[in-house]
Image (spheres, rainbow, N blue to C red):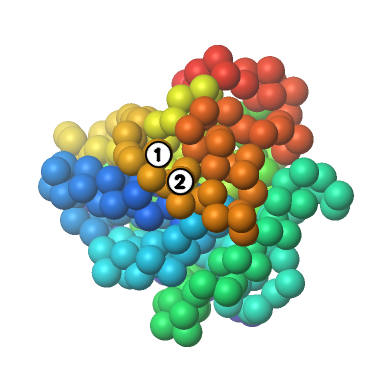
Amino acid sequence: MDQITEKLGQKSGKLLVFGGVYSNLQALEALKQVAEQEGIAPENCICTGDIVGYCAQPEETVQLFKLWGAKSIVGNVEIQLRENAADCGCDFREGSRCDGFSQLWYPYAQSKLSENSLAFLKTLPNYINFRYANQKVNVVHGSYFNVSEFIFKSTPWATKQPNFKATKSDIIIAGHCGLPFYHQKENKLWLNPGVIGMPANDGNPSVWYAILDDAQNTLSFTHKTLNYNYKLTSKLMQNDLLPEEYSRTIVTGIWDNTEILPAIESGLQGFGIQL
């Protein structure tokens, strides 16, 4: 399938950026309320992909996202769903716990999505770019080169830097890895706002997003936590079809395993997010 970039031109005012809704309807409802309270228009709310994922309400989540009118690129999950692929394409190691869990939640999501929702997912671009505060911004899921690539704070700059060159960008907003962070070097910024569908392995059920501001035509950004009805989300996931471990993570804020994490991020499990 051709790689599609949606070009938004010049953006101004506050931007709300987030990733990984993961079929978590309650978190999406809460984030939409934040945007409305902050006076941030839907077209200034941008998702890094994986609207669908681990939680219990994929259809309702896609429909609310569509109704809201926020922007999003495709994550690997959307790509796989709209191509009717057999797996989530998350790049989990074969035979790992995450791989085993995906064999539960991915077919569950496939079974729940309507043709209308799949048609909406097919409209989503691979990338979004725009100018903001005199800088060029590119939104990717994993990386520009690989939608399923896990890029973390500890990932070497030498791995991140080619993404800026290929996209001619000053700022890359990315998702996929599930942890909020930023990494600045060489007048470039790699920003991961975090995800709203699952906690960030920090021992807290709240989830993460970020707000960008261009006051005085100067870029600033703030990572923020989102409180939502996580108890309801967890209860809905206890349906004998989804991994019980993920419903527990929603409440505890601790991942079942750290097999996708580099050593540094793995060692920070339960110690809060180090921004």
Instruction: Return the mark for residue 231.
Output: 1
Q: Which residue is mark 2?
A: 235
Relative to residue 61, is residue 78 drawn left or right? Answer: right
Q: Is residue 167 visible?
A: no
Label 2 CA crowd tier, 10 Å (few <14, some 14–19, many 20+): some
Left or right: 249, with 223 as reference point: right
In-image side of 186 versus 128 (left or right): right
Residue 63: give x, y in percent of width and height.
Answer: 35, 70
Quadrant placement of the N terminus: bottom right
Image height check: is 119 above or below 254?
below
Q: Is residue 258 visible?
A: yes
SS type, badge 1? helix
Q: Type of residue at label 1?
A: Lys
Whether tag 2 and tag 1 are in contact, CB under 8 A, the answer is yes
Report the residue that reaches farthest toward the right. Answer: 95
Q: Nearer the viewer, residue 103 or 134?
A: 103
Image: 230 above or below 99 = above
Q: CA distance from mark 2 to mark 1?
A: 6 Å
